[in-house]
Amino acid sequence: MSKFLIEGGRSLNGDVEVMGAKNAGMKIIAATILAKGKYQIANVPQIADIFTLLEILKYLKAKVKFENHLLVIDTDNLINRPLPEKLTGQLRGSVVLIGALLGRFGEVKIAQPGGCQIGARPIDTHLDAFRQLGAEIKEDKDFYYLQWNKQNQGDKIIVLPEMSVTATENMILASVLRNGKTEIHIAAAEPEIEDLAIFLRSMDAKINGAGTNKIKIQGVEKLKTTDYQIIPDRIEAGTLIIAGIITKGNVIVKKIIPEHLELFFLKIKSMGANFEIVYSYPDKKYADIKVSPTEKLNPIIKLDIRPYPGFPTDLQAPMAVLMTQADGKSEIFETMFENRLGYIRELQKMGAKASVKNKHLAYITGPTPLFGKKITTLDLRAGATLILAALIAKGETEINKVEIIDRGYEKIEQRLKKLGAKIKRI
Ligand code: EPZ
C-alpha cells in the first residue's frame, strides 16, 4: 500500500479542474447493460472504482476503450453470467449491476457487494424493493440469485424503506424495460440519480420525477445506445473548495454545478468563508468558484447530515477540518451512517480538539493548530479529509493506505501539487 507525505502550512493558489461524478459514472456504466451497441461517455473520472466496474463489464464480454476521460463501451456481445466476489467484493457501487442485469436478462447471480466499512450498509433495502417489483430472491452464504416471478408484469408502486441512493437507482434500472408502469416512492433525490435518468431518457427510456422523492417509469420494449457527458463531482468540488479556504489561498475550482451544492455554500458562507460563484459559461448551470483568503471562521452550531437536498454525508468529514479552524464549538450530527466519524480519532492525533459523543454525534472546538503525524485513512471521504488536515498541519504528515483515496479522487496529489501543495506519493 502506498502512502502520501505532505508538508503542511502552504497556501494553495491557482485553478483546479473537477472530475466527472464517480457516483453518476458508475451507475451510467451499469445502465449500458440495458441496450446492445456502442456508447461514448465523456467526463468519466479515471479512478479505481470506475476501473473496477469496467473490469466487470469486460467480464460480461463488453468491449471497453477508456482514455482521456472518454469511455467507449460496446455491449454487442454482452452476456449474463454469475458475478464472483473477486470482482464485486471491493465495490459497493457494484450493487447497481443487479438492477441492470435483472432489467435486461430477467435474472442475475451476484456475490455479496463490498465497499467502504462505514456502516452496516445492508442491501436489504434493495432486496425488499426488488421483491415489491416482482423478483424472486434466493441467497446462500456467497451469492444472491434474483429472477422475475410471474407477478412482475403490470403497474406497481414501490415504497422504499428508506431514501437509499443505490436502491433507487436499482429500481430505475430494473424498471425501464419491465412490461408495466412503475412508481418509486420515498426515492432518493441525489443529482447523480437525475443524471442517470437523463442518460436513460437519451436511450428512449420513459422516466419522470428523478431528482424528487417520487419517480414514475413507463417500461418500454427496447432501449437504444447513446452518447453522454457526466456531471461534475459535487463532492470533489466541495472538498477542493474547502482546501482553498483552509489554506487561505486564492483557488478557482472550475466548472461545477452550484445548484448541487446550495446547502454547502450556505454553510460555508455562515462560517464566514470568502468565495464567489462566477457564472461564465454559455450553459448557465455551470460556474467557477473563486475562493479567496478568509481571516476568521465561525463554527457551525449543528451540521445536520440528511439525504439530498440535505447536507451530504460525503462532505461531513471534510467540513470537520474547517471546524477545527473555526473560532468556537461546532456540532456534527451524522444521521446517515453509523460508522463515519472514525476519522475524528486521526484528527485528534493531529491536535484537533474533538469529542465523539456516540456513533452519530461529535463536537469540534477550534481554532486549534494541527501537527503532522502518521495517520491512516478509513473510507475514501475520510481519506480526502486527512489530506485537507495535512495541508494545514505544521510539519510533515504521512497518510497510509492511499489506494482508498484513489477510489474516488483522480490524481489528487498531482492536482494539489499544481496548486502549490507539497505532497508526494511513495
Ligand atoms: C450512496 O451509497 C453513495 N455511493 C455513497 O457514497 C453516499 O454516501 C450515499 O449514497 C449517500 O446516501 C454510491 O452511490 C456508489 P444509501 P448507498 O443506500 O446507496 C442510511 C462515496 O464515498 N440511510 O443511500 O449505499 C442507510 O441505512 C459513497 O462515494 C438512512 O439512514 O447509500 C445507509 O446506512 C460512500 N436514511 C446509509 O444511509 C435514509 O433515508 C447510506 O444509504 C437513507 C439512507
Image (cartoon, rainbow, N blue to C red):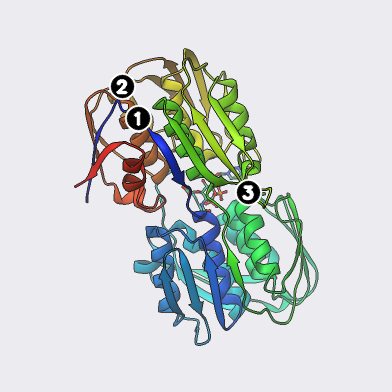
The residue beneath circle 3 is: 281
The residue beneath circle 2 is: 370
Residue lying farthest top? 328
Distance from Cα at disc 3 to Cα at disc 2: 38 Å
At a point 60% along the width and 67% down the height, the residue shown is: 228
Q: In this rendering, would 71 be left or right of 101?
A: left
Looking at the rendered structure, the secondary structure element under dot 1 is: helix
Select label 1 or label 3 by which is in front. 3
Q: Residues within 10 Å of mark 2 (few under 14, many from 20)?
A: many
Q: In this rendering, would 107 be left or right of 70?
A: right
Looking at the rendered structure, the secondary structure element under dot 2 is: loop
Q: Residues within 10 Å of mark 1 (few under 14, many from 20)?
A: many
- Which amino acid type is marked by label 2? Leu
**Closest to the observer: 293 or 425?**
293
**Closest to the observer: 31 or 173?**
31
At a point 65% along the width and 60% down the height, the residue shown is: 129
Residue 141 appears anywhere in the view: no
User: Is the CB of the residue bearing disc 2 within 8 angstroms of ligand 1?
Assistant: no
Q: Position of residue 99 (x, y in %)?
A: 59, 68
Q: Earlier in the sequence, mark 1 or mark 3?
A: 3
Q: Earlier in the sequence, mark 1 or mark 2?
A: 2
| Residue 389's disc number | 1
